Amino acid sequence: MSIMEFISEIIDYGFVQKALFTSVMVGIICGIVGCFIVLRGLALMGDAISHAVLPGVAISFLLDINFFYGAVAAGILTALGIGYVNQNSRIKSDSSIGIVFTAFLALGVLLIRYAHSGVNLDSILFGSLTSVQTSDMWMTLIVGAIVLLVVVLFYKELLISTFDPTMAAAYGLPTKLIHYMLMILLTLVTVASMQTVGVVLVVALLITPASTAYLLTNRLWVMLILSAAFGVISSLAGLYFSFAYDLDSGAVIVLTSFLLFAFIFFFSPKQGVLWRAIRSKRKRNAAS
Amino acid sequence: MEHKSIAFSVQDLTVSYGEQTALKNINFQVEKGKLVGVIGPNGAGKSTLMKASLGLISKDHGTIEFYGKPVKQMRENIAYIPQRNNIDWDFPINVLDTVVLGTYPKLGVFHRPKKADRKRAQACLAQVGLQKFSKRQIGELSGGQQQRVFLARALAQQTEIFFFDEPFVGIDASSEETIIHILKKLRDEGKTVIVIHHDLSKAQEYFDDLVLINQDLIEAGPAASVLTPEALGKAYKSQLPFLQSEEADES
Ligand SMILES: Nc1ncnc2c1ncn2[C@@H]1O[C@H](COP(=O)(O)OP(=O)(O)OP(=O)(O)O)[C@@H](O)[C@H]1O
Ligand SMILES: [Mg+2]
């Protein structure tokens, strides 16, 4: 299927439109929340929370409620649990993350099997854009609106508590509260991305576009916009290849964002490895 | 007696880290419009005193007041530069935007810095002599320049009270002169400035009053009255073995 044919399909078929809206929104919010995750050094935390929503999904199924609530509750419990272990012992933070989230993940696997849930484990783990429902789309759009609103309203507070938590605390910002607020956003974004990339790979959409943007700019708001753009480009690639060639959308999205990263890593004008090598060689030649 | 307004008072402050006591029953007051040095040997609890005063670490007991109010109500009126900035030097922020952060506390939630705030930040950057560097990424500065950026940011906070933890460490003589000049100017404008300092030789020249601590409060008051051999001996004895042996001889 050519790109033109694909565009006409988007116009003609409702289910393709739903997948389009969902994946674009997922690209934007993963890109934006991912910037804060990357800058705060919480990439591992993103990985943990995304995996730990699994038991929440299973429990929601057992209780016959929308999986959204269970997943969000599990994500927040994980964030709190990790914080608790970290602050009340000498366990280092990467270890406490590993301890807590693997337990949640293991529980999730057992519960999903036990529940005979009909929950398709594969589509939760790896995403499936072709099966996006109307309710999924609305959930993603609402979550996206919440995330964007919070980031716009509290941009200043997020910036300073990320850059200099000591100053933030000294002038009275509730830095712990901001941390947990960010963990809630992270959980919401993860749950909203389940259909698109799946829980195994969502961490890539959180950290890869943000890291790519990080290589390109020295201003936070530019980084946020670039990261969102890279997220959207990756999502659109995932959308196209999953409809046109029946490939796994999550895998395509992650590979696309990786290719963008690799390109910028080597060729970006400021930080690019290639230009840096050329510049230092020129300097050395000039000196000799 | 003339009534002087007390900007900062510490009553009966005790702070410990787990089992270990860092500060014991500290009492002193700082008058408004004074430039005050806090001195004492390494590990005396100077940084701890600042952090506890600002409510950044919890205290065992004691009362801290700024103009008679608890720190919670006065946070916007206090600027603080810690001894070590544990920040990410690769953060996507330039020098000017770092100084603009100083305008945040007074803006409150939901308000963005305006043109006037950026102008003020620029002026503060000029005061520390770094206007040329305003577009540089924050990590692309020398250690001394970085220190001055944080001073500029504290100036942009336009507070009544300033806390500086060892601002002269790793700084050359001319930068030190610039900084002490700025601190004295703040004092002359009626601000209260509290500085942790290491170099005893400059203490009298720089500060109006001194607070000498080593877990306990050894002495507080006008600089000349604190810098007595007895007080210094008491504060530094554990650090200076020859003083200890002298004491042993006496007894
Ligand atoms: N986070 C901490 N946990 C445990 N003990 C600490 C902690 N921070 C400081 N201490 C201890 O408290 C005491 C006072 O430390 P503090 O940092 O206040 O000293 P200081 O006077 O600022 O020293 P310096 O001149 O070296 O900066 C020291 O004995 C130190 O070992
Ligand atoms: Mg100290």
Image: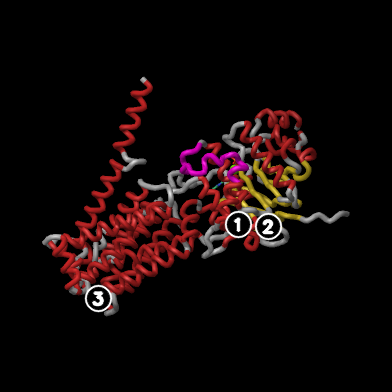
Question: Can you identify the residue that label 2 sits on?
Answer: B64
Q: Residue at x 76, y 40 (%)?
A: B223
Q: Nearer the viewer, mark 3 or mark 2?
A: 3
Give whichever of A238, A189 is nearer the camera: A238
Q: Are marks 3 and 2 in contact (CB under 8 Å)?
A: no
Mark 3 CB in 8 Å range of ligand 1? no
Kind of residue at badge 3: Thr
The quadrant of the rendering that contains the C terminus of chain A is top left
**Label placed on residue B55:** 1
Mark 1 CB in 8 Å range of ligand 1? no
Q: Nearer the viewer, mark 1 or mark 3?
A: 3
Kind of residue at badge 2: Ile
Q: Residue B141: percent from the left, percent from the top?
A: 49, 38
Give whichever of B90, A68 is nearer the camera: B90
Numbered marks: total: 3
Question: Can you identify the residue that label 3 sits on?
Answer: A134
Distance in Å between CA atoms under marks 1 and 3: 50 Å
Give whichever of B231, B71 is nearer the camera: B71
Mark 3: give few (<14), some (14-19) or many (20+) Cα within 10 Å: some
- State whether residue A96 appears in this view: no
Q: Which residues are magenta?
A: B124-141
Q: Residue B183: percent from the left, percent from the top?
A: 68, 43
